[in-house]
């Protein structure tokens, strides 16, 4: 399988994150919320406003990581919006700190993108400044599973656990984390 190379010109950090669940949305799945600084990146706010005026939009998503000989420290979610507004940017995730958030997006197959300003929190989400973005399987799952297991195992090794203990603990943490992401809220 060949790897696509993507040029990333606009990297957008996450200001805050959280999760939300609604029985009437995404089959009741928990969905991550990513709050992005719309003051520094006003095009994202424009995108959300225009998207809310239409019934749907088109987005091409690609997961990636920095090309390095060492273990990657960052994972990128490259978003290319085609409709209703053409805009391209990448959201950067710190692998050792935001692994659960990345896994949540992959397990839920989507997330809410929320435009905010410094100080805004995910709990401030409303229909006027956020959109749901679907993230289908784009052949990243197997790579991600290996990266996640390795990252968690390394975290435990740094804490002084043996290799065997680290592998066992990382496997258990992944299982528990995914049980949470797979919770469904039934329709009322």
Image (tube, rainbow, N blue to C red):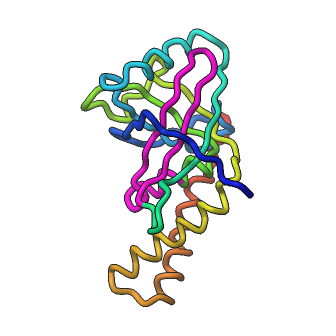
Label total for image: 0
Direction right: furthest residue: 1
Q: Image quadrant of residue 55?
A: top right
Q: Is residue 1 above or below residue 172?
A: above
Queried whether the magenta region covers residue 116, the answer comes back as no
Secondary structure mostly seen in magenta is: strand
Q: Is residue 50 above or below residue 1?
A: above
Residue beneath the point at 45% across and 67% down: 71
Q: Residue 149, how many percent across, how many down?
A: 54, 71
- Across and down, in percent, residue 184 comes to 64, 47
Looking at the image, is 146 positioned above or below residue 187? below
Q: Residue at x 53, y 65 (%)?
A: 148
Q: Residue at x 51, y 70 (%)?
A: 173
Identify which residue, 153 or 42, lies in the foreground. 42
Query: Does the segment drawn in magenta span residue 80?
Result: yes
Residue closer to the observer: 30 or 185: 30
Q: Quadrant of the N terminus?
A: bottom right
Q: Which residues are magenta?
A: 73-102
Residue 56 position (above or below residue 23): above
Q: Which corner quadrant holds the C terminus? A: top right
Q: Nearer the viewer, residue 172 or 86?
A: 86
């Amino acid at each position: 399988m060949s790897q696509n190379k993507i040029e990333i010109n606009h990297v957008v950090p996450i200001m805050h994150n959280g999760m939300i669940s609604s029985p009437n949305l995404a089959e009741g799945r928990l969905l991550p919320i990513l709050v992005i600084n719309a003051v520094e990146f006003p095009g994202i706010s424009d995108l959300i406003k225009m998207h809310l005026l239409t019934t749907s939009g088109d987005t091409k998503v690609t997961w990636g990581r920095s090309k390095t000989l060492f273990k990657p420290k960052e994972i990128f979610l490259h978003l290319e919006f085609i409709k209703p507004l053409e805009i391209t940017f990448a959201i950067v995730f710190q692998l050792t700190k935001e692994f659960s958030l990345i896994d949540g997006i992959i397990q839920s197959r989507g997330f809410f993108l929320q435009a905010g300003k410094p100080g805004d929190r995910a709990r401030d989400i409303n229909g006027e400044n956020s959109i749901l973005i679907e993230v289908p399987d784009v052949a990243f799952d197997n790579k991600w599973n290996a990266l996640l297991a390795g990252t968690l195992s390394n975290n435990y090794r740094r804490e002084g656990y043996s290799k065997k203990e680290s592998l066992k603990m990382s496997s258990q943490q992944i299982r528990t984390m995914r049980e949470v992401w797979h919770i469904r809220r039934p329709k009322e």
